[in-house]
Image (cartoon, coloured by chain):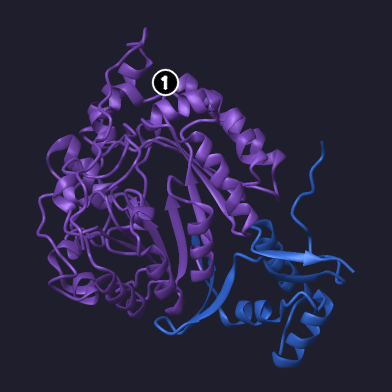
Chain colours: A purple, B blue
Amino acid sequence: MDRPFGLLAELTYGCPLHCSYCSNPLDLAAYRDELTTSEWRRVLSEARDLGVLQLHLSGGEPLLRRDLAEIVHSAGELGLYTNLITSALGLTARRAEQLRAAGLDHVQISVQADEPILSDRLAGTPSFQHKVTAARLVKELGWPLTLNVVLHRHNIDRVDRVLDLAEELGADRIELANTQYYGWALRNRDGLLPSRAQLERAEVVVRAARERMRGRMEVIYVLPDYYSRYPKPCMGGWGRRQLTVVPDGGVLPCPTAHTLPLPRASVREHSLAWIWERSELFQRFRGTNWMPGPCRTCDRRDVDFGGCRCQAFQLTGDAARTDPVCHLSPDHGIVAQAVQAANEGPWPRDTVMTPRLRRAARRSR
Amino acid sequence: MPSPGPTQMTDGALRPRLAPHVRLTFDPARAQHVLLTPEAVTVLNSTGAAILGLCDGERTVTEIVAELRARYDRVENDEVQLFLDRLAARRYVVVRHG
């Protein structure tokens, strides 16, 4: 059996931002009973024994956890490479220095756009200026900096200016990732999915930037899978390279797998090794034996692993079907229809989008 | 404005070292050396690990090849350079000139 390389630790679903494309669960309040510091320590130690080498600290906003530096320190002692994925809200100079001292390896800051008005509108809260200040602080403290930008219809035309901002901030990497349609983003899909023309323009800009910044800044561009011929190899295969632990100790093969009608697994009930190796949840879609046609006989079954189980379930009601994004899927019409709607003008100029909710206060610990 | 591309290691006088955010470590779970970087884990074979273990910013590429030759039967100059070029292109390895 493969050993996992990465653990995504979603420390809390509390977040000061209200992005309409948030991938967190819709029922945020169900996750209030968060793991304690010592429970996280145990999880990290078990993860290391299982083969995990990278720890991605995310949420929600991981800085809302006051014990973040302690968690980072424990991870460092275990030899894990630590990566903070943050909105930067709460990343004060003092906090940053604490994390630096604790041994944090890498910081990823999200920005919603290249300028304050749009960025703050998309984030649902004034935040842009602070993000810029925090990004500078990250560089001053000597960390490698990645900027994360989720792209959609409302900001993709500004991708050139977003790249300029990244360059000005001295980012080492920028991830320009088109929205993936889960959770809040699926609910808001009609207001977010860009047109083909927008994507084509963005691609030209990205290609030129890659050339221009070669050797200085790595430019990662993730296409929206709705426009791809084949599905994405979600998580590099089910229960194969990555696992996610959510705030209340639930363990998932991918961060959105809580949407699937599968038995739960929790570090409060089992060891991480048992969950990875033995739980029904992790075995259900591992490998290729579970696959229906057309995946079963497809040459790409070990390349994209049938695509995303969550997307299959959300769009067809059956998690074991081929990802409808694939042009060979019998359900591809569902995706084709959404793409068609995004390309037929005029756009509903003021599509009402549902911002993700502010979650009720965390249970005090 | 022209920008410098990734460094080529064909100049044997270059002194490569791991970039500050990159970590070379031994993974007991897999019994292999690995290179840890912001978004990727690269599992190394024993030759790759040996090359990177010598990239300390002091030794030149020529010196690294010489040391490897003392340890292994066959070490191709080109292969070491190619390996380091690939890692330099991803900015896992940086060089000091002179």
Label 1: chain? A
Relative image position of residue B72 (x, y in whole percent) = 69, 90
Give the left or right position of residue B93, taking residue A358 as reference: right
**Extreme residue toward the right, this view:** B98
Is residue A186 shown above or below A42?
Answer: above
Is residue A37 shown above or below A304?
Answer: below
In the image, what residue occupies the spot 33% across and 13% down? A350
Which secondary structure lies at badge 1?
A: loop
Q: How crowded is mark 1: few (under 14 residues within 10 Å), some or many (20 or more)?
A: many
Tell me which corner region of the image, top left, top right, bottom left or bottom right, holds residue A164.
top right
Nearer to us in this view, A169 or A224: A169
**Which of the image's four quarters has the N terminus of chain B?**
top right
Relative image position of residue A136 (x, y in whole percent) = 61, 47
In the image, what residue occupies the spot 79% across and 43% down? B3
Residue ID for mark 1: A195
Give the left or right position of residue A256, taking residue A73 as reference: left
